Amino acid sequence: NAGVTQTPKFQVLKTGQSMTLQCAQDMNHEYMSWYRQDPGMGLRLIHYSVGAGITDQGEVPNGYNVSRSTTEDFPLRLLSAAPSQTSVYFCASSYSITPPVENTQYFGPGTRLTVL
Amino acid sequence: AQSVTQLGSHVSVSEGALVLLRCNYSSSVPPYLFWYVQYPNQGLQLLLKYTTGATLVKGINGFEAEFKKSETSFHLTKPSAHMSDAAEYFCAVSGGGTSYGKLTFGQGTILTVHP
């Protein structure tokens, strides 16, 4: 298994540009999520999905869109990039969100995004 | 609502010394607690987790943590630090019900290990 994969690893955008961060997992996990990591703030949840066709907002959703058409993929879209979106983005997945089934989240390697 | 506070954004120890990273949480339901480690320019790797049962949890690389409900704490320890332990450590909590799948992270603690 490749686990959770993310592309690209690095990206530089200009303010106002759009782009999609890709995330895929091959573990047949129900739950997928996107976090952003900023210095001194830990990781904050942007959006999450409990299965194909179902998404919801996390703590910091503004400026980001998601969709989940398949179990494997969960792309994150920036519609009009802003300097405040400069961050490291992590995708994560877990088998289930229903206790007592395993809910450990497995993280991808991250995408480092800079918005100029 | 749930939250996590990690006491100390930077901790420095000598090689061979005890490592103690502090984590306090708040949760309105019985929590599930996690410690993750992040090495430079890498993703997060699970060190250990507490779900139910035994309150002393052993993880990888010689780390362990004890869940203390009365103190709402889940501190991470390692008896003897190694240079390879230098990394950033995150404590995280998830709750029951609709919060089961959502992780709330602390702000992280950077561990430095001196020779």
Image: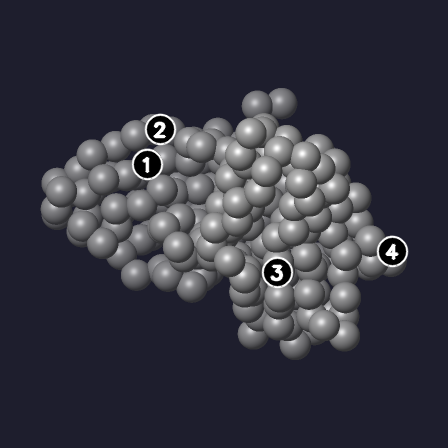
Q: Chain of mark 1?
A: A
Q: Is residue B105 above or below residue A76?
A: below
> What is the distance, in whole Å, between disc 3 and disc 1 at their CAs?
27 Å
- Which residue is at the front of the view, A23 or B29? B29
Disc 4: CA contacts within 10 A as few (<14), some (14-19) or many (>=20):
few
Secondary structure of residue under mark 1: strand
- Which residue is at the front of the view, B77 or A30? B77
User: In the image, which is nearer the foreground, mark 3 or mark 2?
Assistant: 3
Mark 2 is on which residue type? Lys
Q: Position of residue A102 (x, y in %)?
A: 73, 48
Q: Chain of mark 4?
A: B
- Which residue is at the front of the view, B80 or B55? B80
Farthest-out residue, top? A1
User: Which residue is labeled 1 in the image?
Assistant: A112
- CB under 8 Å between discs 3 and 1: no
The image quadrant that residue A3 belongs to is: top right
The image quadrant that residue B26 belongs to is: bottom right
User: Which residue is labeled 3 in the image?
Assistant: B23
User: Which residue is labeled 4 in the image?
Assistant: B54
User: Which residue is labeled 2 in the image?
Assistant: A9
Q: Position of residue A62 (x, y in %)?
A: 30, 61
> What is the distance, in whole Å, between disc 1 and disc 2 at their CAs?
6 Å
> What is the distance, in whole Å, between disc 4 and disc 1 at their CAs?
38 Å
Q: Identify which residue is drawn at 42% across, 35% down.
A: A110
